[in-house]
Image (cartoon, rainbow, N blue to C red):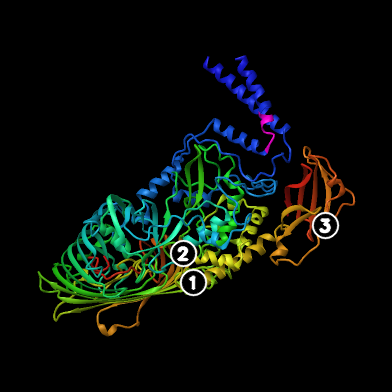
């Protein structure tokens, strides 16, 4: 022990001699550090970030392939939903994509879907998508038909439907998509389960609300043309997106509801100040063409109101055979992960095509926040004001959406 | 018994540390005989160093909302370390003095870190791994000579943009002194690509699976193709050694005995701020760096690289650079609040910048560029700690590039559009000039001190680069005590000619000449020493 102490006490003196140079000074610091090297390891917090980055990163679409959690919203008003998705993008060497998901919300809304697609074939010219979905939404709002429905007449109904749809499309030139769809749609409407409001069938009858008593199944062929030159569909700042789509609904069970539906949409994004400010404009119209003595069932009518169009009104506030809405947004970048927006909306639903004008439109205005990761919006929050009060809406994608209605196998805005 | 042993150990360690401190203090002096060093001593052997990944999100949040590392206190600033007494960064496993110390020829500048290992111009290019996730798709390939490269592509919207930026910037960073990979512009026809057996791909879902020819076709669909030359990419030669992962811009590697200077205090990393500003390297973060364990002469040590320059100049790798880049952090409270509360009516100056309609350039300009206000994507501890002498050190290296040399390096980007090449070169020249104006004037920019013909000689970089007209200097000579650091002025000695006392001094005597121009706060004190019958410049101190 005495020897050790002596050596230890003499060591500094020896070292002092040794560090009589700049190089020696550096070497001494190294020698000291070499006494107790520690493995360079991430902290617990960093490991947690690793997990988030690898498993649930929004950048890669919510996580790894295979089974993965699915969090979001099913339909406006459904509340937060949780579910499980199975995704394979690696089939046939990456040629095919298979996806299936089951989701349920805390308000007992449910959705089950299955999708198989071939995103590119025939030298990247063609695409094919096969999709089926079953939805059970127990409390969809209904205020009665037409633009004059009373705010106080809010009721709710259950919409249950099952749909099979196939889409075959071609990309003849850059940005242009032309496609045909073929679908079959089974519908069921039942009493709403939101106990705060009366069930729709108790206050509305079949003459004013066609289809509320009996529902039909539909054969649904259609076609669409889309010219999309937005710079970044996940969070567009420039370019445009123009959609024309016609869908024929053929009632296969009741013979009461044969009609055609024309969807028109124009989106234009006008950037200024180096794209840090954007004027986003949208005009959208849905026109239906019932056959003689046929009616459009209320559950397939165009709907207005909510966080996607007339943001100062409750979701599904207005139903009728036709719809016209325009939106204008001024967006500015607050920081790289968030834009703010001031918006105005104007729109109406109407019975006759002759009413396709801006007379008697409903208006709303408000502000919103768009959160993005790498320029892709993953969360949207809008606060809209109208003469019916204010509404707070959320979304998980850009406000104006992006594709033809049926090309993704979705029905109307549900 | 165990407790007693621990106590004894503690006492011994405490005593040892105290002695060490005292002996170090007792032996302290401003200059040693071996000053000024030109390179660090031979490294200690690294017994064991483990690879370490870094979370991109963690890095962003940690640096944006916290202040890792030691920051400059309000008083008694912390000067840069691992510099010699002249203020120059030592040659080391981090940095090698190149262009400023010994001007490189045009050929050497264009050659960059090497031109001996380009991918073979013929034969198959075997794909041995690939990724489709992340911001840019890419392959790892092996050419017919068995050399491996990481291959990255340009975005469809901006052909040549990212690949040119990667090559040009790696050549500049090499000339500026950093260790960088060899980057080559590669053109190839798709038939040359073959998938090696058992090659895996990391797909868009982060999933590993066997790779097929279809995967190559999918990736190539997303990248531009030249009708004659085929696909263009940047091929980055694999860096030799065991990959350890990125280095951080604060602290030290705990398993590397040679890494003793906190990174936030390294001059080569503080000065990197200026180089990054010049080249638009706003993505100067840990993830774009690499440590490798290399072995030379039987000695294993950690070598530090900068890499991935695809997001420099006007490129952000997969898109053109955001006008915000280099002007604001991705998030900062003050500008965010200004934007939030002004409803977007507050328009920052950078939002009005004009960019050329040149896809190969992206968004790169020099009019709005303000070197002092330049920012990386998020705070970098080394950048935040920079002092005027750090930025002076870096700025003089930037200013050492002539117009002709800049154009020669830009040519290595192999732009097919001469307008793009001209724009990049013109911007770099204009940005270089702004850097000179900003940082050479923060101090008295005297450099390259020497004793010539009985006089103290130096270069005034302000005058040399036409930032100021020729000027007069005030000089005050002193005798300098190397142990106490006391100066005793030599009366009447106020010229640049060495005083007689200095010339006739004895071996090992020290003197100091304090020089200032019109601004008395900006001084340079030059220390001289008599050694082997010669008077040599041994150190420099700057004030500002």
Pointer 3 chain: B
Q: Is residue A67 visible?
A: no
Q: Residue A226: x percent and y percent?
A: 29, 74
Q: Is tag 1's residue or tag 2's residue first in the polypeptide sequence? A: 2
Pointer 2 chain: B
Q: Which residue is mark 1?
A: B420
Mark 1 crowd level (few <14, some 14–19, many ≥20, 10 Å Cα) = many
Q: Which residue is mark 2?
A: B164
B236 vs A115, nearest the viewer? B236
Q: Is tag 1's residue or tag 3's residue first in the polypeptide sequence? A: 1
Q: Is residue A398 visible?
A: yes
Quarter in which the N terminus of chain A is drawn: top right
Pointer 1 chain: B
Q: Is residue B380 above or below residue A230?
A: above
B511 with respect to B13 (left or right):
right
Q: Residues under labels 1 and 3: Cα distance?
A: 47 Å
The total of numbered circles placed on residues is 3
Point out which mark residue A343 bears.
Answer: none
Q: Residues under labels 2 and 3: Cα distance?
A: 48 Å
Point out which mark residue B474 bears.
Answer: 3
Mark 2 crowd level (few <14, some 14–19, many ≥20, 10 Å Cα) = many
**Which residues are drawn in magenta?**
A15-21
A223 with respect to B455 (left or right):
left
Q: Residue B336: x percent and y percent?
A: 53, 61
Q: Secondary structure at mark 2?
A: helix
Q: Residue at x 44, y 39 (%)?
A: B50
């Amino acid at each position: 022990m005495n020897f050790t102490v002596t050596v230890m006490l003499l060591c500094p003196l020896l070292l002092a001699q040794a560090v009589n140079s700049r190089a020696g000074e550096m070497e001494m610091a190294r020698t000291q550090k070499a006494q107790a090297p520690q493995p360079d390891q991430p902290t617990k917090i960093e490991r947690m970030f690793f997990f988030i980055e690898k498993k649930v990163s929004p950048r890669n679409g919510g996580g790894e392939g295979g089974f993965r959690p699915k969090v979001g919203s099913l339909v406006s008003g459904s509340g937060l939903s949780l579910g499980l998705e199975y995704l394979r993008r690696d089939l046939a060497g990456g040629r095919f994509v298979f996806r299936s998901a089951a989701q349920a919300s805390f308000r007992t809304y449910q959705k089950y879907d299955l999708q198989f697609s071939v995103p590119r074939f025939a030298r990247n010219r063609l695409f094919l998508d096969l999709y089926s979905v079953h939805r059970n939404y127990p409390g969809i709002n209904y205020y009665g038909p037409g633009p004059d429905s009373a705010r106080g007449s809010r009721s709710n109904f259950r919409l249950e439907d099952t749909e099979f749809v196939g889409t075959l499309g071609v990309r003849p030139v850059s940005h242009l998509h032309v496609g045909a769809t073929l679908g079959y749609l089974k519908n069921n409407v039942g009493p709403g389960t939101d106990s705060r409001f009366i069930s729709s069938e108790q206050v509305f009858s079949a003459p004013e609300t066609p289809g509320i008593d009996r529902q039909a199944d539909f054969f649904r062929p259609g076609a669409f043309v889309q010219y999309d030159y937005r710079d970044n569909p996940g969070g567009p700042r420039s370019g445009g997106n123009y959609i024309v789509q016609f869908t024929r609904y053929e009632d296969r069970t009741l013979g009461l509801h044969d009609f055609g539906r024309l969807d028109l949409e124009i989106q234009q994004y006008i950037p200024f100040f180096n794209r840090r400010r954007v004027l986003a404009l949208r005009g959208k119209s849905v026109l239906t063409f019932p056959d003689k003595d046929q009616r459009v069932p209320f559950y397939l009518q165009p709907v207005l109101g909510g966080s996607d169009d007339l943001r100062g009104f409750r979701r599904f506030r207005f139903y009728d055979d036709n719809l016209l809405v325009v939106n204008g947004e001024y967006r500015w970048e607050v920081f790289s992960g968030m834009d703010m927006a001031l918006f105005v909306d104007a729109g109406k639903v109407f019975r006759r095509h002759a009413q396709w004008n801006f007379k008697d439109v409903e208006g709303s205005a408000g502000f919103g926040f768009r959160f993005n990761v790498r320029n892709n919006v993953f969360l949207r929050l809008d606060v809209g004001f109208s003469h019916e009060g204010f509404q707070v809406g959320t979304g998980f994608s850009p406000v104006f959406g992006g594709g033809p209605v049926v090309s993704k196998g979705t029905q109307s805005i549900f | 018994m165990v407790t007693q042993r621990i106590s004894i150990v503690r006492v011994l360690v405490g005593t040892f540390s105290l002695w060490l401190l005292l002996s170090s203090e007792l032996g302290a002096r401003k200059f040693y005989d071996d000053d000024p060093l030109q390179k660090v001593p031979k490294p200690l052997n690294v017994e064991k160093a483990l690879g370490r990944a870094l979370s991109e999100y963690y890095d962003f949040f940690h640096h944006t909302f916290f202040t890792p590392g030691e920051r400059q206190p309000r008083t008694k600033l912390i000067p840069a370390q691992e510099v010699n007494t002249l203020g120059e960064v030592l040659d080391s496993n981090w940095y090698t003095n190149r262009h400023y110390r010994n001007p490189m020829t045009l050929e050497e500048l264009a050659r960059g870190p090497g031109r001996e290992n380009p991918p073979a111009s013929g034969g198959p290019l075997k794909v041995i791994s690939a990724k489709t996730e992340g911001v840019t798709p890419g392959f790892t390939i092996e050419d017919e000579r068995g050399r491996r490269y990481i291959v990255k592509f340009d975005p469809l919207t901006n052909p040549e943009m990212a690949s040119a930026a990667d090559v040009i910037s790696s050549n500049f960073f090499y000339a500026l002194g950093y260790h960088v990979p060899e980057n080559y512009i590669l053109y190839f026809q798709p038939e040359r690509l073959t998938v090696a057996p058992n090659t895996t791909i990391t797909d868009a879902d982060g999933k590993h699976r066997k790779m097929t020819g279809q995967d190559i076709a999918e990736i190539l669909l997303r990248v531009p193709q030249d009708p004659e030359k085929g696909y263009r990419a940047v091929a980055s030669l694999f860096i030799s050694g065991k990959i350890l992962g990125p280095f951080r811009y604060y602290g030290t590697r705990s398993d590397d005995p040679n890494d003793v200077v906190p990174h936030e205090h390294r001059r080569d990393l503080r000065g990197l701020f200026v180089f990054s500003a010049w080249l638009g390297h706003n993505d100067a973060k840990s993830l774009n760096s690499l440590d490798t364990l290399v072995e030379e002469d039987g000695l294993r040590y950690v070598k530090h690289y900068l890499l991935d320059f695809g997001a420099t100049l006007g490129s952000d790798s997969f898109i053109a650079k955001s006008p915000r880049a280099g002007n604001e952090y991705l998030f900062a409270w003050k500008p965010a609040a200004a934007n939030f509360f002004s409803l977007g009516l507050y328009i920052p100056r950078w939002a009005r910048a004009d960019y050329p309609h040149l896809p190969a350039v992206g968004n790169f300009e020099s009019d709005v560029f303000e070197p002092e206000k330049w920012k990386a994507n998020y705070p970098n501890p080394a950048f935040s700690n920079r002092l005027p002498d750090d930025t002076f050190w870096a700025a003089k290296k930037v200013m050492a590039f002539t117009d002709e040399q800049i154009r020669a390096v830009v040519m290595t980007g192999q732009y097919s559009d001469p307008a793009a090449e001209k724009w990049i070169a013109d911007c770099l020249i204009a940005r270089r000039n702004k850097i000179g104006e900003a940082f050479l004037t923060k101090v008295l920019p005297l450099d390259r001190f020497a004793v010539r013909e009985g006089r103290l000689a130096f270069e005034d970089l302000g005058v040399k680069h036409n930032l100021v007209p020729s000027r007069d200097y005030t000089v005050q000579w002193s005798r300098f005590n190397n142990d106490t650091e006391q100066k005793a002025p030599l009366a009447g000695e106020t010229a640049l000619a060495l005083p007689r006392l200095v010339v006739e001094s004895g071996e090992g005597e020290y003197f100091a000449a304090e020089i200032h121009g019109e601004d008395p706060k900006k001084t340079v004190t030059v220390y001289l020493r008599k050694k082997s019958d010669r008077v040599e410049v041994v150190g420099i101190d700057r004030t500002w």
